[in-house]
Image (spheres, rainbow, N blue to C red):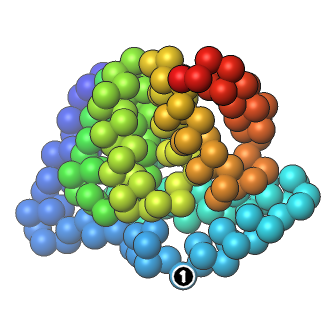
Amino acid sequence: MKRLLLTVALVLMAGLMAAGQGFATGANSRNDARLEPLFEQLKAAKDPAVAQILEAQIWHIWTWTTTEDVNLLMRMGIGAMDRQDFEAALLHFDEMVRLAPDFAEAWNKRATVHYRQGNYRASVIDIEKVLEIEPKHFGALSGLGLIYLQLEQKKPALRAFEKAKEIHPNLPNVDSVIRDLRRDVEGRGT
């Protein structure tokens, strides 16, 4: 039944595109004027509760577009991820990447699915695309750090987490991860 619903949704979307309605997203991250002030406030935030509110605002901008069809794919993909139906989630995010290639969060969500499936190479490729579109994507940088940890590549993991912390100093748990990685990297000279 899930596969049938997904197929119907994709056929309907293909029909809309053929009718000329398209799927251009709203402003992508690079052009969204709301982000830079939020990043500045996030970097300066001393109160973790304030940082959490700013982070939520950034995620909202990253996750939703002005195109409801793309938002529908996002909701369907997130729902599939929540159910751990990674095959369906991947289909939704693949379609988002195809229809809205400048939508960084489509790439990031797909990278997350690849990570959860243990496909680290594909996840890194998608994260690189996220960072090309949105260089300040602290979530993608943190994800990259997690991948490098899984691959036991501590130096690149440390660099990724440090970049994420530079953008989002109040990122939960990052201080202890960086401290442990620094100790390991400096202690072994790797």
- Residue type at mark 1 is Ala
Secondary structure at numbered mark 1: loop
- Whether residue 98 is situated above or below residue 50 in the rendered picture: above
Residue at figure coordinates x 16%, y 46% from the top left: 11
- Specify whether 5 is left or right of 179: left
Residue at figure coordinates x 42%, y 54% from the top left: 131
> Which quadrant holds residue 8?
top left
- Whether residue 11 is situated above or below residue 36 in the rendered picture: above
Judge the density around disc 1: few (<14), some (14-19), many (≥20) Cα neighbours within 10 Å. few
> Please, which residue is most extreme toward the left here?
18
- Whether residue 76 is situated above or below residue 99 in the rendered picture: above
Residue 20 appears anywhere in the view: yes
- Specify whether 95 is left or right of 70: left
User: Residue 65 placed where, x, y %?
Assistant: 44, 65
Residue at figure coordinates x 39%, y 18% from the top left: 118
For disc 1, the marked residue is 33
- Whether residue 172 is situated above or below residue 131 in the rendered picture: above
User: Residue 101 placed where, x, y %?
Assistant: 26, 58
Quadrant where the C terminus lies?
A: top right
Residue at figure coordinates x 26%, y 26% from the top left: 3
